[in-house]
Amino acid sequence: MIAEHFDETWDSSWCNKMCDNCASNSVKNCTNESDLDLTKYITMAKEIIENYSSNDKGSGRITAPKLAELMDKKLSNISREKVEKILSTLLLQGFIEEDFHFTPYSIISYIVMGARGKYNGGSSSSSSMPSSSTKNSIKDYKKRNANEPSSSNGIKKSKPTVIELI
């Protein structure tokens, strides 16, 4: 895909399965993301966050890495990368949110239940991860020639003169 973008020829035998796309296809237990129902993961994240916040020891708050670690322990059949993808999807879809805590020396991001997560907690309505095929690819965008000036709102920009550059 990158070679296409730069108008270069590419032989697939040169890859040697070292790029991220080939490596991600070989990850074990990788299911089709569009088939993955997030309802049980929402419920699990909600339980972990509520148990952690009601716990007497500690601050009662949980960070994203700790939530990923605890979910990874419960979901032994799914890889850590997949758990992190699930959590990022929950974050992007508003089921969980970041709550920032400011200290004099750092900013700490804690995970709390979002508006959709509080409402959807264990209900029967299903949510699923977006399919990777629905994302825009590089082919979807028109390539602009280097000689062609960029335009906005249909107005072509002229090349800058020497005076404009100074």
Image (cartoon, grey):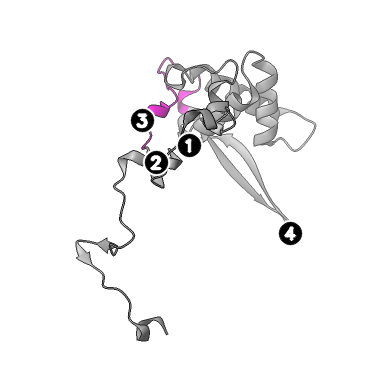
User: Which image quadrant for residue 146?
Assistant: bottom left
What amino acid type should be assigned to the residue bearing mark 4? Pro
Which of the numbered marks, if any, corresponds to residue 106?
none
Residue 56 rendering spot, x and y as whole percentages = 77, 30
State yes or no: discs 2 and 4 in contact (Cβ < 8 Å): no
- The residue under the point 58% across, 15% down is 29
Q: Tell me the SS state at disc 3.
A: helix
Residue 95 rendering spot, x and y as whole percentages = 49, 31
**As rendered, which of 94 and 21 lies closer to the eye?**
21
Q: Tell me the SS state at disc 4.
A: loop
Dot placed on the residue nearer the N-terminal end, 4 or 1 = 1
Measure the alpha-carbon separation of dots 2 and 4.
48 Å
Which of the numbered marks, if any, corresponds to residue 104?
4
**As rendered, which of 55 and 76 lies closer to the eye?**
76
State yes or no: discs 2 and 1 in contact (Cβ < 8 Å): no
Q: Residue furthest left?
A: 154
In the rendered image, which quarter contains the N terminus? top left
Q: Tell me the SS state at disc 1.
A: helix
Measure the alpha-carbon separation of dots 3 and 1.
16 Å
Kindly report which numbered mark, 4 or 3, lies closer to the viewer in this rendering.
3
Measure the alpha-carbon separation of dots 2 and 3.
20 Å
- The residue under the point 28% across, 65% down is 149
Does any portion of residue 53 appear in the rendered image? no
What amino acid type should be assigned to the residue bearing mark 2? Glu
Residue 25 rendering spot, x and y as whole percentages = 53, 22
